[in-house]
Amino acid sequence: MAMIATGLPGCQSHSARDTADQSPGYDAPSAIVLGEGQPYGQVFDAAREVLMDYRFAIDRVDARLGVITTYPKRTAGLASPWDREQSSMNQEWEDLVNEQRRVVRVEFDQDEQGGASATVSVELLRTHRPGWRVETESVRLSNHALRRDVNGELEPGSYLELVGLDAEFASRLALAIQDRLRDEAGEP
Protein backbone atom coordinates (compact mmCIF):
# COMPACT_ATOMS: atom_id res chain seq x y z
CA MET A 1 0.00 0.00 0.00
CA ALA A 2 2.85 2.39 0.81
CA MET A 3 4.29 1.75 -2.62
CA ILE A 4 1.02 2.75 -4.29
CA ALA A 5 0.74 5.97 -2.26
CA THR A 6 4.27 7.04 -3.16
CA GLY A 7 3.52 6.50 -6.84
CA LEU A 8 0.60 8.92 -6.82
CA PRO A 9 1.68 12.58 -6.80
CA GLY A 10 -1.65 13.68 -5.30
CA CYS A 11 -1.10 11.49 -2.24
CA GLN A 12 2.29 12.95 -1.43
CA SER A 13 3.19 16.12 0.36
CA HIS A 14 4.15 18.75 -2.18
CA SER A 15 6.01 21.97 -1.59
CA ALA A 16 7.61 24.70 -3.68
CA ARG A 17 10.99 23.20 -2.79
CA ASP A 18 9.93 19.87 -4.34
CA THR A 19 8.99 21.70 -7.52
CA ALA A 20 12.33 23.50 -7.50
CA ASP A 21 14.16 20.18 -7.32
CA GLN A 22 12.09 18.50 -10.05
CA SER A 23 11.58 21.33 -12.48
CA PRO A 24 14.45 22.35 -14.76
CA GLY A 25 14.88 26.09 -15.01
CA TYR A 26 13.19 26.83 -11.67
CA ASP A 27 15.98 29.27 -10.84
CA ALA A 28 14.71 31.43 -13.71
CA PRO A 29 10.93 31.19 -13.26
CA SER A 30 10.13 33.84 -15.82
CA ALA A 31 10.72 34.18 -19.53
CA ILE A 32 11.73 37.29 -21.43
CA VAL A 33 10.08 38.50 -24.62
CA LEU A 34 12.27 40.85 -26.64
CA GLY A 35 10.24 43.16 -28.82
CA GLU A 36 13.31 44.10 -30.93
CA GLY A 37 12.33 47.57 -32.06
CA GLN A 38 8.59 46.96 -32.00
CA PRO A 39 6.43 49.60 -30.34
CA TYR A 40 5.27 49.13 -26.77
CA GLY A 41 1.61 48.97 -27.76
CA GLN A 42 2.25 46.21 -30.28
CA VAL A 43 4.11 44.04 -27.74
CA PHE A 44 1.38 44.72 -25.15
CA ASP A 45 -1.42 43.76 -27.56
CA ALA A 46 0.42 40.62 -28.69
CA ALA A 47 0.78 39.45 -25.08
CA ARG A 48 -2.90 40.06 -24.36
CA GLU A 49 -3.96 38.20 -27.53
CA VAL A 50 -1.73 35.20 -26.71
CA LEU A 51 -3.23 34.96 -23.22
CA MET A 52 -6.72 35.01 -24.73
CA ASP A 53 -5.64 32.32 -27.25
CA TYR A 54 -4.72 30.15 -24.26
CA ARG A 55 -8.20 30.90 -22.86
CA PHE A 56 -7.06 32.85 -19.81
CA ALA A 57 -9.54 35.36 -18.39
CA ILE A 58 -7.76 38.70 -18.12
CA ASP A 59 -7.87 40.14 -14.60
CA ARG A 60 -5.85 43.35 -14.85
CA VAL A 61 -4.72 45.29 -17.89
CA ASP A 62 -2.65 48.33 -16.99
CA ALA A 63 -0.79 49.68 -20.02
CA ARG A 64 0.45 52.72 -18.11
CA LEU A 65 2.22 50.64 -15.45
CA GLY A 66 2.98 47.84 -17.90
CA VAL A 67 1.20 44.88 -16.29
CA ILE A 68 -1.23 42.21 -17.46
CA THR A 69 -2.47 39.60 -14.97
CA THR A 70 -4.98 36.78 -15.36
CA TYR A 71 -7.51 35.15 -13.11
CA PRO A 72 -6.51 31.68 -11.88
CA LYS A 73 -7.29 29.13 -14.60
CA ARG A 74 -8.02 25.53 -13.64
CA THR A 75 -7.46 22.57 -15.91
CA ALA A 76 -8.09 18.88 -15.38
CA GLY A 77 -4.82 17.72 -16.92
CA LEU A 78 -5.28 14.45 -18.78
CA ALA A 79 -9.07 14.85 -18.62
CA SER A 80 -8.92 18.14 -20.57
CA PRO A 81 -6.67 17.60 -23.61
CA TRP A 82 -7.83 20.89 -25.19
CA ASP A 83 -5.96 22.88 -22.52
CA ARG A 84 -2.31 23.47 -23.40
CA GLU A 85 -0.87 24.62 -20.07
CA GLN A 86 0.92 21.42 -19.12
CA SER A 87 4.45 20.85 -20.42
CA SER A 88 4.90 17.21 -19.40
CA MET A 89 2.95 14.07 -18.55
CA ASN A 90 3.85 14.64 -14.90
CA GLN A 91 2.10 18.04 -15.01
CA GLU A 92 -0.88 16.45 -16.81
CA TRP A 93 -1.17 13.89 -14.00
CA GLU A 94 -0.65 16.49 -11.23
CA ASP A 95 -3.44 18.66 -12.67
CA LEU A 96 -5.73 15.62 -12.91
CA VAL A 97 -5.35 14.41 -9.31
CA ASN A 98 -5.03 17.87 -7.69
CA GLU A 99 -7.13 20.96 -8.15
CA GLN A 100 -4.43 23.28 -9.52
CA ARG A 101 -4.67 26.66 -11.19
CA ARG A 102 -2.23 28.87 -13.07
CA VAL A 103 -1.98 32.65 -12.86
CA VAL A 104 -0.01 34.52 -15.52
CA ARG A 105 1.66 37.89 -14.96
CA VAL A 106 3.29 39.80 -17.81
CA GLU A 107 5.36 42.89 -16.96
CA PHE A 108 6.53 45.26 -19.69
CA ASP A 109 9.57 47.54 -19.95
CA GLN A 110 10.08 50.25 -22.53
CA ASP A 111 13.56 51.22 -23.72
CA GLU A 112 14.81 54.64 -24.85
CA GLN A 113 14.34 53.85 -28.56
CA GLY A 114 10.64 53.08 -28.07
CA GLY A 115 11.01 49.30 -28.21
CA ALA A 116 9.59 47.08 -25.51
CA SER A 117 10.33 43.85 -23.71
CA ALA A 118 8.15 41.72 -21.47
CA THR A 119 8.74 39.33 -18.59
CA VAL A 120 6.30 36.42 -18.33
CA SER A 121 5.84 34.52 -15.06
CA VAL A 122 3.35 31.77 -14.22
CA GLU A 123 2.37 30.85 -10.66
CA LEU A 124 1.02 27.37 -9.91
CA LEU A 125 -1.64 27.37 -7.16
CA ARG A 126 -3.18 24.33 -5.47
CA THR A 127 -6.57 24.27 -3.74
CA HIS A 128 -6.67 22.76 -0.25
CA ARG A 129 -9.87 21.69 1.48
CA PRO A 130 -9.06 20.86 5.10
CA GLY A 131 -11.48 19.01 7.33
CA TRP A 132 -12.75 16.41 4.88
CA ARG A 133 -14.23 13.54 6.86
CA VAL A 134 -14.26 10.44 4.68
CA GLU A 135 -17.07 7.99 5.35
CA THR A 136 -15.74 4.43 5.18
CA GLU A 137 -18.99 2.86 3.98
CA SER A 138 -19.71 5.23 1.10
CA VAL A 139 -17.74 8.17 -0.24
CA ARG A 140 -20.93 10.07 -1.08
CA LEU A 141 -21.74 10.22 2.65
CA SER A 142 -18.47 12.06 3.37
CA ASN A 143 -18.68 15.63 4.63
CA HIS A 144 -16.51 18.57 5.64
CA ALA A 145 -15.94 19.77 9.17
CA LEU A 146 -16.67 23.45 9.74
CA ARG A 147 -14.27 25.49 11.84
CA ARG A 148 -14.70 28.82 13.51
CA ASP A 149 -12.00 31.40 14.03
CA VAL A 150 -11.29 33.34 17.23
CA ASN A 151 -14.17 35.74 16.54
CA GLY A 152 -16.65 32.91 16.00
CA GLU A 153 -16.81 33.41 12.22
CA LEU A 154 -16.81 30.38 9.95
CA GLU A 155 -13.49 29.83 8.22
CA PRO A 156 -13.51 29.29 4.46
CA GLY A 157 -13.78 25.69 3.34
CA SER A 158 -10.86 25.96 0.94
CA TYR A 159 -7.81 28.06 0.22
CA LEU A 160 -5.20 28.41 -2.52
CA GLU A 161 -1.52 27.80 -1.85
CA LEU A 162 1.39 28.67 -4.13
CA VAL A 163 3.21 25.41 -4.86
CA GLY A 164 5.67 26.70 -7.44
CA LEU A 165 6.36 28.59 -10.61
CA ASP A 166 5.79 27.01 -14.00
CA ALA A 167 8.91 28.08 -15.91
CA GLU A 168 8.23 25.76 -18.86
CA PHE A 169 4.80 27.24 -19.50
CA ALA A 170 6.16 30.78 -19.06
CA SER A 171 8.77 30.01 -21.73
CA ARG A 172 6.12 28.66 -24.09
CA LEU A 173 4.00 31.79 -23.58
CA ALA A 174 7.02 34.01 -24.25
CA LEU A 175 7.76 32.09 -27.47
CA ALA A 176 4.11 32.40 -28.54
CA ILE A 177 4.25 36.17 -27.97
CA GLN A 178 7.46 36.43 -30.01
CA ASP A 179 5.91 34.33 -32.79
CA ARG A 180 2.86 36.60 -32.85
CA LEU A 181 5.10 39.69 -33.06
CA ARG A 182 7.10 38.07 -35.87
CA ASP A 183 3.88 37.21 -37.77
CA GLU A 184 2.58 40.77 -37.39
CA ALA A 185 5.89 42.14 -38.67
CA GLY A 186 5.72 39.81 -41.68
CA GLU A 187 8.95 37.98 -40.82
CA PRO A 188 9.34 34.26 -41.60
Image (cartoon, rainbow, N blue to C red):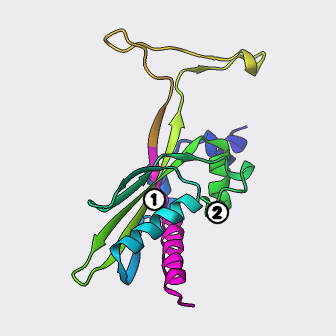
Q: Hey, what amino acid is under mark 2?
A: Ser
Q: Which stretch did the figure color magenta?
A: 162-188
**Is-magenta flag for residue 14?**
no
Q: Position of residue 112 (x, y in %)?
A: 21, 81
Q: Position of residue 127 (x, y in %)?
A: 53, 37
Q: Quadrant of the N terminus?
A: top right
Q: Residues within 10 Å of mark 2 (few under 14, many from 20)?
A: few
Residue denoted by label 1: 20
Q: Hey, what amino acid is under mark 1?
A: Ala
Q: Quadrant of the C terminus?
A: bottom right
Image: 75 above or below 178: above
- 69 or 156, which is in the foreground? 69
Image: 130 above or below 94: above
Q: Would residue 184 be found to the left or right of residue 11 on screen?
A: left
Q: Residue at x 46, y 66 (%)?
A: 47
> Looking at the image, can residue 25 be seen?
no
Residue denoted by label 2: 88
In the rendered structure, which disc, 2 or 1, sits on the residue that comes first in sequence? 1
- Residue extending farthest top: 152
- 35 or 102, which is in the foreground? 35
Q: Residue at x 45, y 14 (%)?
A: 147
- Residue extending farthest bottom: 188
**Residue 149 location, quadrant:** top left
Q: Position of residue 4 (x, y in %)?
A: 72, 43
Q: Residue at x 59, y 40 (%)?
A: 99
